[in-house]
Image: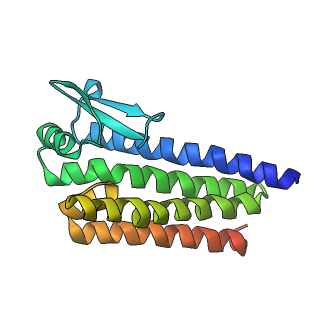
Amino acid sequence: MTLFFQIFFANVVLLFLLISVHELGHWFFGRLAGIPNNQMKIRLLTFPQQVQIRDTDGWVSVSTFDRYFTRLRELVPSRSGQFAYVVGGFVFETVFLITVTFVVGYQGYWLYAIVAPGLSLMMYLIYLFAMDFPQSRALQKPWGDSTILYSLAPRCAIIVAACMVVVRITLVLLAAFRWLW
């Protein structure tokens, strides 16, 4: 029973960390793309968790997509900069996940090294197929990170999505078979 609570608590903490790191990635890549610090803020206690950007009327939620993306285009006129801003969450999250998996695996906590990428993979697939794709289809416009990336650069977005899945499956297998430790 103790192991159950340890894994449950670790999953809750990991979920919060993955979301936080993901949003930090958007913020960091937004800064690299040229968005001023005072024009962005990370919101973790809202749904969806997000980086809001400021326009003349106040803070804009990604939930108001047209207003949000209009402002993003003003702040970051290049498509490559916009792509970088959106993909930044996936980049930070993946680097963090690789680091966590190897650190806990090398420390001998191989079960947690399996659970971390497994949870991340499940989160991504649920997000993709239960939230992003259905909302985008219903609204007839991009809704979340993956469909926004696809609207900016379809081939690159498919590569990003494939890499998200392949990296996580690879980490699960590496940890499950303890190939690196």
Q: Residue at x 28, y 47 (%)?
A: 85
**Which percent across, then down, holds residue 79?**
15, 53
| Residue 67 horizontal side relative to residue 158, left or right | left
Q: x%, y% of residue 100?
A: 62, 53
Most extreme residue toward the right, as rendered?
Answer: 1
Looking at the rendered image, the quarter that the N terminus falls into is bottom right
What quarter of the picture does the C terminus occupy?
bottom right
Q: Quadrant of residue 4?
A: bottom right
At 35% across and 37% down in the image, what residue appears?
51
The answer to which of 128 and 100 lies nearer the viewer is: 128
List x then y, in percent, for residue 9.
72, 46
Closer-to-camera residue (11/116): 11
* Residue 20 as seen in the image, left or right of residue 148: right
Q: How is the image coloured?
A: rainbow
Residue 151 falls left or right of residue 9: left
Q: Residue at x 24, y 54 (%)?
A: 83
User: What is the total number of numbered labels drawn onto the structure image?
Assistant: 0
Q: Is residue 140 above or below residue 13?
A: below
Q: Quadrant of residue 156?
A: bottom left
The quadrant holding residue 176 is: bottom right
Query: Looking at this rendering, what residue extends furthest in the front direction?
Result: 138
Query: In the image, what residue occupies the spot 27% across and 24% down?
Result: 38
Across and down, in percent, residue 141 comes to 20, 58
State whether residue 140 is above or below residue 9: below
Could you tell whether 41 is left or right of 83 in the image? right
